[in-house]
Amino acid sequence: MARSTKRVYPPFPRVRSAALLEAAIYLRSVKTALRGDQEKCASFTKLMEDYLHHRVTVEQLVSVAKELFRDHEELIVGFNDYLPEQHRICVPVQDI
């Protein structure tokens, strides 16, 4: 009997490392906080994809994230965990 070649992927949040689990949990908190604003949620997802593929710099990443999360200090605090210290966003957000 032929063996099935269908791949079975583990369901979220079953991930291979603690760092990936933390990132998945953070992403879920972003989606929950921005639940009423699908445009912002989509913008953040695209921003992260663009950063991953080197289409934006860390400075651009921070600038856009700062604006997206302006009314969500808890998201900025969580986002800072993934940024180099020199790029962290001050809370409360200050206009520059």
Image (spheres, rainbow, N blue to C red):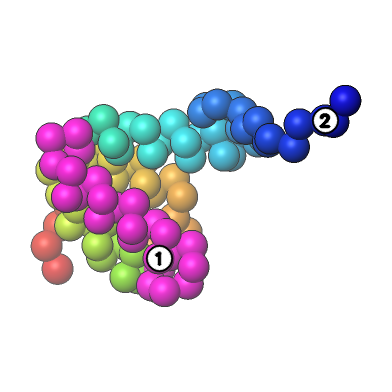
| Residue 8 counted in the magenta span | no
Main SS of the magenta part reads: helix
Front one among 43 and 21: 43
Q: In this view, does 80 lie to the left or right of 24?
A: left
Which residue is identified by label 2?
Answer: 3
| Residue 42 counted in the magenta span | yes
Earlier residue among tags 2 and 1: 2
From the top left corner, tell me how far across and down residue 22 is, in percent: 51, 34
Label 1: which secondary element = helix
Q: Give the range drawn in magenta.
A: 34-58
User: Which residue is located at x 17 percent, y 50 percent?
Assistant: 39
Mark-to-mark CA distance, 2 and 1: 38 Å
Front one among 3 and 27: 3
**Split into 4 quadrants, where in the image is the N terminus?**
top right
User: Which residue is located at x 44 percent, y 31 percent?
Assistant: 25
On residue 50, which mark appears? 1
From the top left corner, tell me how far across and down residue 61 is, in percent: 34, 64
Q: Single out the residue that lies furthest toward the front.
A: 1
**Which image quarter: residue 3?**
top right
Residue type at mark 1: give it: Asp
From the top left corner, tell me how far across and down residue 23 is, in percent: 48, 40
Q: Is residue 92 visible?
A: no
Residue type at mark 2: give it: Arg
User: Which residue is located at x 35 percent, y 70 percent?
Assistant: 59
Front one among 84 and 38: 38
